[in-house]
Amino acid sequence: MVKNKFLNTLTISFFFILFYTFSQIFYTKNLNFNDDLQIIIGEESKLNAIWVGSKYLDKNIPILILAGHADSQGMAGAGTPGEAVDKFGLNPMDPAISDELFWNLKLQESIVKIGKKKGLNIRSYDPRIRNIDDANDPRTNWSVGKKFVKDGGYAMEIHFDAYGKYGVGSGLIPPFFEMPNKIDESLARKFGRYPVLFRGGLGAPRRQIRILEIGKLEGSLEKNLRNLKTRQRTINLISIEIVKAFLSGII
């Protein structure tokens, strides 16, 4: 009896170690980097969205980049853990935050850095407090973004979508009460578009903050982000395409 239990435990442990080792190799092996954005980020939203951004903007419009879920860790809105962690059991990039936030922050920094080099009037905001219960607290992404737009700026929150059947794909969610503009249209043509009333109207768009879903945090996108040999090139590729879309929308 004891011997059988020992053998069963040993067998389960062996298969767990084998599965974990395979997962590590699957997500960290040397990849052939592909510089095609659509191949990297995967499918875009196929939801019915009929809006078109036509409003012209001043070329010096202030732009604010927010990292989605930066103030909502440890609660339901923490962001997706990603396929690697949730499905394949890999370690999170940072145990204190969701993998989505980890990549949101990396991308936020890169977009602002590249955008400034290209002459954009662009900046970022990070509340630094990772768990703010009140969505209307003046330190949250939503509060800062809402004020920024009210003062004449363009605010966008970066996100990675949930993996598998839980996600929709890449695309821009436009503001709820404001006519989409040329930047919105430029981003939508590059990444795809969501309907204005996606899920009944999300918190950020209701505050005139755009949401850009980069893509589902799975497959080649997540593998390229996790692999040290392709990570920075992947972040740079996505950031450059976002900055190009900004430039195209204001020129």
Image: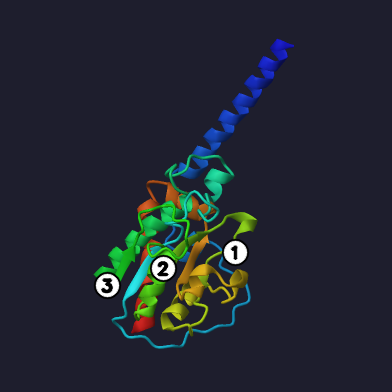
Q: Which label number is shown at residue 118?
A: 3
Binning the other alpha carbons within 10 Å of mark 1 as few (below 14), some (14 to 19) or many (20 upward) gives some
Task: Give the distance between the C-alpha atoms of the residues marked 3 and 2, in whole angstroms.
Answer: 28 Å
At label 2, the amino acid type is: Ser
Of the two numbered discs 3 and 2 in the rendering, the one whose residue sits closer to the viewer: 2
Badge 3 element: loop
Look at the image and tell me whether residue 58 can be seen. Answer: yes
Label whose residue precedes the other's in the sequence (3 or 2): 3
Instruction: Name the quarter where the C terminus is drawn.
Output: bottom left
Amino acid type at image mark 1: Val
Secondary structure found at label 1: loop
Q: Kindly identify the residue that appears in the image at 53 percent across and 50 percent down.
A: 82
Callout 2: few (<14), some (14-19), or many (20+) C-alpha neighbours within 10 Å? Answer: some
> How many angstroms separate mark 1 from mark 2 (CA)?
26 Å
Q: How is the image coloured?
A: rainbow
Q: Is residue 245 above or below residue 90?
A: below
For marks 1 and 2 on the same chain, the one whose residue lies earlier in the sequence: 2
Closer to us: 148 or 15:
148
Residue occupied by mark 1: 168
